Amino acid sequence: MNTAREPLIRLEGITKRFKNLTAVDRIDLDVFPGEKLVIIGPSGSGKSTLLRSINLLEEIDDGVIRFQGREVGYVTSHGRRHLDRPPAVCALRTEIGMVFQHFHLFPHMTVLGNVMEGPLIVRKMPLNEARQVATDMLSKVGLSDKRDVFPATLSGGQKQRVAIARALAMRPKLMLFDEPTSALDPELVGEVFDTIHTLADEGMTMIIVTHHMGFARELADRVIFMESGHFLAQGNPHEFFSVGQENERIRSFLNRLL
Amino acid sequence: MNRFYILISRVAVTLLFLWTLAGTGRALDSDALSRQAGELMAQGDLPGAVELLRQIPVPPKGADAGAFVASRMQMARIYVSLNEADKALAASREVLALFPDNSEARNAVAAIQKQQQSRWLSLLDDSRKFLPALLKGATMTLLLVLCTMLVSPLGGLLIALGRISTFRPLSAACWFVIWFFRGTPLLLQLFFIYYGLPAFGVTLPPLTAAVIGLGLNYSAYLGEIIRGAIQSIDQGQMEAAKAIGMTYGQAMRRVIIPQTYKRLMPPIGNEFIALIKDTALVSTIAMVELMRSADQLFNTYFNITALALAAAIYLLLTSIFTFIFEKIEYRAGIYEHR
């Protein structure tokens, strides 16, 4: 990893509070182009909130997000900080793909329709072009034969692969995976994992929140353990999972999972 | 003592009288029966006369049947005058059973049947007389229904989007519209628009006033239905749409609202069925639609057929629309069936 390069995304002091709970507490993070970052930790530790803050689905209370060196997402007017104008917010989101735990495919559109929706409506591509992009993405996730069915007929694993294709169709620079295999039957985890693996091999920058240690071991350049809104520890997977596990909290967490 | 004799003699006389009656009754021959029946008829006791005539027996084969035939034909005439066509027919047919060629009985049967048919014919005649006016009224009803069906879903959608807007003044305004138009009678709203607005210098033709009144009222109802349907769509859909870079408007138009169609159809179908019947209210603001036409005919001819026909037309309209709504509901949810 070339740390001399400029980070793709840089978080400075990100803080998000819900009523009386600080879900994300002054988090700093640099993610470099091509890097695969895996965040693990107990549920409620702020992993998802942090991920959602990056593409502005969660409005943060404090901190700065820089994308390719540029400060994004928030403006200050009359001394009050608030979310940027919709066009700026939408523009950032087109650069960042997101995959959700529960897929959130559009049930009223066919598989092809789901994938070409972004290029067609957001990128305003001509129909033929959008269809071509969507077809390419579907073949990339291995679902070309399902292009004309509705999501209701797909298995969980297939739905998640369509969701990945839908995000990829926007040609994002960064992919966020929010527990992409947590809602799947165990025998379906593999196909989704393989799809993400292929993507990683192609050099996509990605941040993955997961409870699936396979991701961390096989994919990650860096693993972060998060608890109570803080980063408790981070390192490359070899260090992280090896005996250098002096942290009591992480050891007990991993022991419960492994 | 005296009273006792009087009582005894009264009882005796009564018994004697009853015995005489019973004896004579049994003994009376056909001639006497028809004579007595004639007397009863003269006194206006038609049911009594019929009872006596009925006692004239069927003659044995070969015997003179003149009295029998005469009695049955007399019964038929009495029944006709009593408006009991079925019994009149039965009496005539007793004669025909013995004498199939009896012309008097045949003519009677034919006449009675013709009279029976003419009742249905008169219904047909009435219908033919009333239908043009009713259909003209129904056309106006249909026009009103279609206009309101066109206007109110759009109005409802705007009100619904306003209600869920985070811009407070807009959502408050939409709340007010719903509160007002759902909270006051439609009849009152129509009166206000047609009779009340001229006081503010706005005079509207009846059709315009009716469409505005119905449109506003139904927009308010549909607004709440649409708002509920939008809010029932999984929050994740909006997030997924935003995550690929859609604006709020694009997400609504492409992702959220299309998913509400299936959920909207049953309650909206319900509202539109109610609308078909609610159009009857505009008859009060000088609109001649189906209800008004039926009312006018009823008051002119005092004939209930006009009202029955109007009911039939309303039922036909509601049936057609129910059928259409069911088809649309199925189409709207097709992605769940495949």
Image (cartoon, coloured by chain):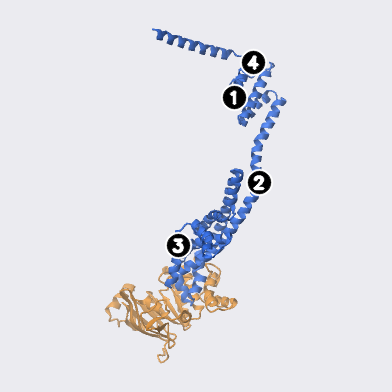
Chain colours: A orange, B blue
State the CA–CA distance, disc 3 to disc 1. Answer: 66 Å
Q: Residues within 10 Å of mark 1 (few under 14, many from 20)?
A: some
Left of B132 or right of it: where is A133? left
Question: According to the image, label 4 marks what residue?
Answer: B31
Instruction: Output the chain of dot 2.
Output: B
The reply to whether callout 3 and callout 1 are in contact (CB within 8 Å) is no
State the CA–CA distance, disc 4 to disc 3. Answer: 84 Å
Q: Residues within 10 Å of mark 4 (few under 14, many from 20)?
A: few
State the CA–CA distance, disc 4 to disc 1. Answer: 18 Å
Say what amino acid the circle numbered 3 marks.
Phe
Residue B174 visible (yes or no): yes
Give above or below for A214 relative to A35. above
Residue B46 image label: 1
Identify the mark nearer the N-term, 2 or 1.
1
Instruction: Output the chain of dot 4.
Output: B
Which numbered disc, 4 or 3, marks the residue closer to the eye?
Answer: 3
Identify the mark nearer the N-term, 3 or 2.
2
The reply to whether callout 4 and callout 3 are in contact (CB within 8 Å) is no
Say what amino acid the circle numbered 4 marks.
Asp
Question: According to the image, label 2 marks what residue?
Answer: B129
- In depth, the one of A49 and B9 nearer the eye is B9
| Residue at the image position 51 percent from the left and 58 percent from the top | B191
- In depth, the one of A166 and A82 nearer the eye is A82
Label 3 in the same subunit as label 1: yes
